[in-house]
Image (cartoon, rainbow, N blue to C red):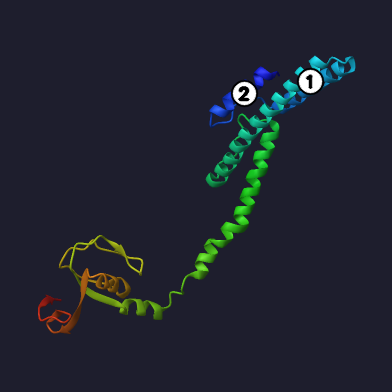
């Protein structure tokens, strides 16, 4: 390991969105390299070789800055990978990770999964969703069926999802349709439909437009 090698690793790491292969023992090599520089520093210090001490100090500062940059870049990538593995549920990949980074990735992923489970999953769990639903009693079902409204469409409209969960439409101008009352009232309030009344008599259903004289007769 030397300064030139470290700078090349930094360049590749900075230019790529993916973790670069630095070897499983990368940080062990760095530690050995720093110990080597420190030994040289002690040796020159004993001899009083100031000029060489100055060179070594400058080299050490460069190495420290480069190592810090490499670590932080790889750290961001590892955290991003951890989030991906949690969201996707895929098995954790350890390619191009050092031994220390592999342990860190597994730990971070575990923490995120545990936190997600204890907070988010509990809040929006299926159990909570079931408990929040209104009980489907016969009384409620009858109420939903009774609360329908018949309207005449005044302009072409796209499909909608009714309050009962069913899809209605698309609608064409002059269509006469029966919708859940809340949806029909929205159309009426928006001025894109008007209510009609259904009057039943034998042998026909007569549909009268509200507050109008026109009528359309429908056979059963």
Question: Residue at the location (57% across, 44% down)?
Answer: 83
Lateral position of residue 135 relative to residue 108, left or right: left
Disc nearest the viewer among 2 and 1: 1
Q: Position of residue 189 (x, y in %)?
A: 27, 73
**Quadrant of residue 181 within the rendered picture:** bottom left
Up-down relation of residue 190 to residue 18 (above or below): below
Q: Would you name the residue on which mark 2 appears? A: 9
Q: Would you name the residue on which mark 1 appears? A: 37
Question: Residue at the location (64% across, 52% down)?
Answer: 114
Q: Earlier in the sequence, mark 2 or mark 1?
A: 2
Q: Position of residue 57 (x, y in %)?
A: 77, 22
**Numbered label attached to residue 142:** none
Callout 2: SS: helix
Question: Residue at the location (61% across, 29% down)?
Answer: 96
User: How far separated are the C-alphas under marks 2 and 1?
Assistant: 20 Å
Up-down relation of residue 155 to residue 205 (above or below): above
Q: Camera-side residue: 17 or 198?
A: 17
Q: Position of residue 124 (x, y in %)?
A: 53, 61
């Amino acid at each position: 390991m030397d300064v030139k090698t470290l700078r090349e690793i930094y360049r590749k790491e900075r230019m790529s969105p993916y973790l670069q292969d630095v070897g499983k023992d990368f940080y062990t090599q760095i530690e050995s390299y720093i110990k080597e520089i420190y030994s040289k520093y002690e040796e020159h210090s004993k001899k009083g070789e100031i000029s060489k001490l100055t060179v070594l100090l400058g080299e050490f500062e460069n190495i420290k800055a480069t190592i810090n940059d490499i670590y932080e870049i790889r750290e961001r990538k590892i955290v991003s990978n951890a989030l991906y593995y949690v969201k996707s549920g895929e098995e954790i990949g350890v390619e191009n990770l050092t031994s220390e980074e592999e342990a860190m990735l597994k730990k971070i992923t575990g923490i995120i999964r545990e936190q997600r489970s204890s907070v988010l999953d509990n809040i929006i769990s299926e159990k909570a969703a079931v408990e929040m639903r209104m009980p489907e009693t016969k009384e409620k079902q009858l109420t939903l069926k009774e609360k329908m409204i018949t309207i005449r469409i005044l302009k072409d409209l796209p499909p909608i999802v009714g309050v009962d969960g069913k899809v209605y439409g698309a609608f064409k101008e002059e269509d006469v349709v029966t919708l859940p009352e809340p949806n029909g009232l929205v159309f009426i309030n928006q001025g894109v439909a008007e209510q009609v009344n259904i009057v039943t008599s034998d042998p026909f259903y007569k549909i009268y437009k509200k507050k109008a004289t026109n009528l359309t007769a429908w056979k059963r």
